[in-house]
Amino acid sequence: MGSNTVHLVAVDAKSGGRPTPMSDWKQSLRLVEMLDSEGNIDDKGVKKLTEAVQEAADLADNLKCEEFLAFATSAVRSATNSQEVLAHLEKKTGVKLKVLSGQDEARLTFLAVRRWYGWSAGRITNLDIGGGSLEMSTGNDEVPDIAVSLDLGAGRLTHEWFDSDPPEKKTVNALRDFIDAELSSAAEEFLVRGEAGLAVGTSKTFRTLARLTGSAPSSAGPYVQRTLTAPGLRQLIAFITRMTASDRAELEGVSSDRSHQIVAGALVAEAAMRALKLDKLDICPWALREGVILRQIDMGQSEGDE
């Protein structure tokens, strides 16, 4: 349960094997936009969330899934009424959601990236932009040296900063300054660790930005190399900041559900790459969901060994 969507992926997973998706269902909620002035998920959001979680649970039953891993990220984590919402969901649907901390989210995403690229990649620095938060991590092993989560998600910033379509230039510039300030402390910690052997971007936002700057479409499959460059991203921002959300939705690779927030996502990507002195990112098809699955497989294997 992310800040943009409720997403169920059923996989055939076993120790030593690659998790193979067997079914994929998602429903757009934009939950991070359903926070009221006090930071509570509003009644409409709770209702929609309950319906979506119930539908996902029913689908998992119909697919005869042996394990059901239900987790939530930034929008629920930061909501003032998080505990009440979780209790309501469990009572109405029987699903007990685990809320991942921002650090755990960054660590699990990093695990997925490390498994995808392997040890030969050396030090990996990973960036992941969700609807509610930005996760950054770096390290030489499967557990990163640093894992940071900041409330710089594309949906959250769009909701909090943009009140016109397209956004006003002065607002875009003010948001740039805000993102730079929020990143400065974490960036210093990353830079002292040294240069990454491989810089990686994960999440739908980075895949969309890469597609808009010339990378292969999703139909080309997960094994095609996709990259996002800093110069390409700067040119893209100059273009999309002058467009309305409906016009951006006409661009190849941009979904109507996310066209309104791609500007904020691009600004976060640009600022994070600049702060960490990254000229290029490789786009990894695996991210948080795969990290959760891989960790569960590892835990099952450890219990079996014992």
Image (tube, grey):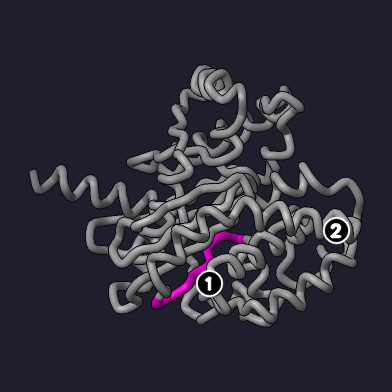
Which quadrant does the N terminus fall into? top right
Q: Which residue is mark 2?
A: 245
Spatial distance from mark 2 to mark 1, Cα to Cα?
A: 24 Å
Give the residue at x 85% y 58%. Answer: 245
Q: Is residue 130 left or right of residue 247?
A: left
What residue is at 59 percent from the left and 69 percent from the top?
Answer: 273
Q: Which residue matches tag 1? A: 283
Q: Pick the quarter of the image with the C terminus.
A: top left
Mark 2 neighbour class, 10 Å CA radius: few under 14, some 14 to 19, many 20 or more: many
Q: Is residue 274 above or below residue 184?
A: below
Q: Position of residue 147 (x, y in %)?
A: 42, 52
200 magenta-colored: yes
Q: Bounds of the magenta span?
A: 197-204
x then y, percent, for residue 226 = 55, 79
Residue drawn at x 67%, y 25% is: 40
Front residue of 109 and 255: 109
| Three-letter residue code for mark 1 | Ile
Q: Is residue 105 above or below residue 50?
A: below
In terms of secondary structure, where does tag 1 sit? strand
Question: Is there any visible trace of residue 166 in the rendered image?
Answer: no
